[in-house]
């Protein structure tokens, strides 16, 4: 039986730690590129989050220019419910046939604004414009009225069973095309 020699190596080639542990130039370049890409990703996420978190009114106009001229979404926290029963509601000065409305679809159901326009015309109101609201996430139907036409707005709300009535909020009178009130259909 032969014994292995004591100085005989079990490895076919000697280890060269300085070459095996050294970082190659391509590895450095890859690491650097990965760090730059990660930094850019973080910047994109932060910028995207900032844009989505609180868009300004100019963002809504840029998304839907044809509707932005008609209406801007009123802030839900500013919408005031109809006056309590103990307060005397303002009396309507104009007959229904002289009240012109803008009907906006704020619930996203196709044809909802046209159906509502037909209902209000059947009640004697005039419809000046039927269009989509800038957003389709209104939780409930809203009646808004121009200054001086609170009575007409209250009467329209009573006629349609709408509980939320407020002065124009987020819309300018010029966007109404001569109408005295706006009906925004909600969910």
Image (tube, rainbow, N blue to C red):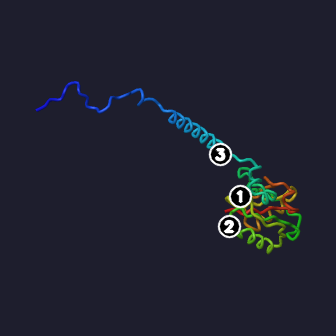
Please state if 146 lies on the left or on the right of 59 as rendered.
right
| Residue name at image x 89 percent, y 66 percent | 94
- Tag 3, which secondary structure? helix
* Front-most of residues 127 and 87: 127
Name which of mark 1 and mark 3 comes first in the sequence.
Answer: 3
Please identify the quadrant where the N terminus is shown.
top left
Q: Residue lying farthest top? A: 7
Residue located 83% across and 69% down the image:
127
Residue 135 disc label: 1
Q: Position of residue 79 (x, y in %)?
A: 74, 53
Q: Say which label, 2 or 1, has the lower sequence index.
A: 2
Q: Residue at x 79, y 60 (%)?
A: 66
Q: Quadrant of the rendered structure where residue 115 is?
A: bottom right
Residue sitting at 67 percent across and 58 percent down?
Answer: 137
Please provide percent x and percent y for residue 109: 68, 67
Q: Which residue position holds label 3? A: 48
Mark 2 crowdedness (10 Å alpha carbons): few <14, some 14-19, many ≥20: few
Q: Which residue is mark 2?
A: 109
**Proximity of marks 2 and 1: CB atoms separated by less than 8 Å:** no
In the image, which is nearer the foreground, mark 3 or mark 2? 3
**Farthest residue in the bottom direction?**
122
Task: Calculate the distance from the C-alpha at mark 3 to the C-alpha at mark 2.
Answer: 29 Å
Q: Quadrant of residue 68?
A: bottom right
Report the Cα–Cα distance between label 2 and label 1: 12 Å
Query: What is the spatial separation of the Cα atoms under label 1 and label 3, in whole angstroms?
Result: 20 Å
């Amino acid at each position: 039986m032969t014994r292995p020699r004591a100085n005989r190596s079990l490895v076919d080639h000697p280890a060269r730690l300085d070459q095996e542990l050294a970082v190659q130039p391509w590895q450095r370049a890859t690491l650097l590129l990965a760090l730059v890409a990660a930094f850019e990703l973080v910047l994109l996420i932060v910028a995207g989050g900032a844009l989505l978190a609180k868009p300004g009114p100019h963002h809504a106009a840029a998304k839907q220019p044809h509707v932005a001229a008609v209406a801007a979404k009123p802030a839900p926290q500013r919408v005031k419910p109809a006056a309590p029963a103990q307060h005397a509601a303002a009396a309507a000065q104009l007959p229904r046939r002289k009240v012109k409305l803008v009907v906006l679809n704020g619930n996203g159901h196709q044809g909802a604004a046209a159906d509502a326009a037909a209902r209000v015309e059947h009640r004697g109101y005039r419809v000046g414009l039927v269009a989509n609201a800038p957003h389709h996430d209104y939780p409930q139907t809203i009646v808004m009225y121009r200054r001086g036409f609170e009575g007409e707005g209250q009467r329209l709300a009573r006629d349609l069973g709408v509980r939320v009535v407020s002065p124009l909020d987020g819309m300018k009178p010029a966007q109404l095309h001569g109408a005295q009130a706006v009906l925004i259909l909600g969910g």
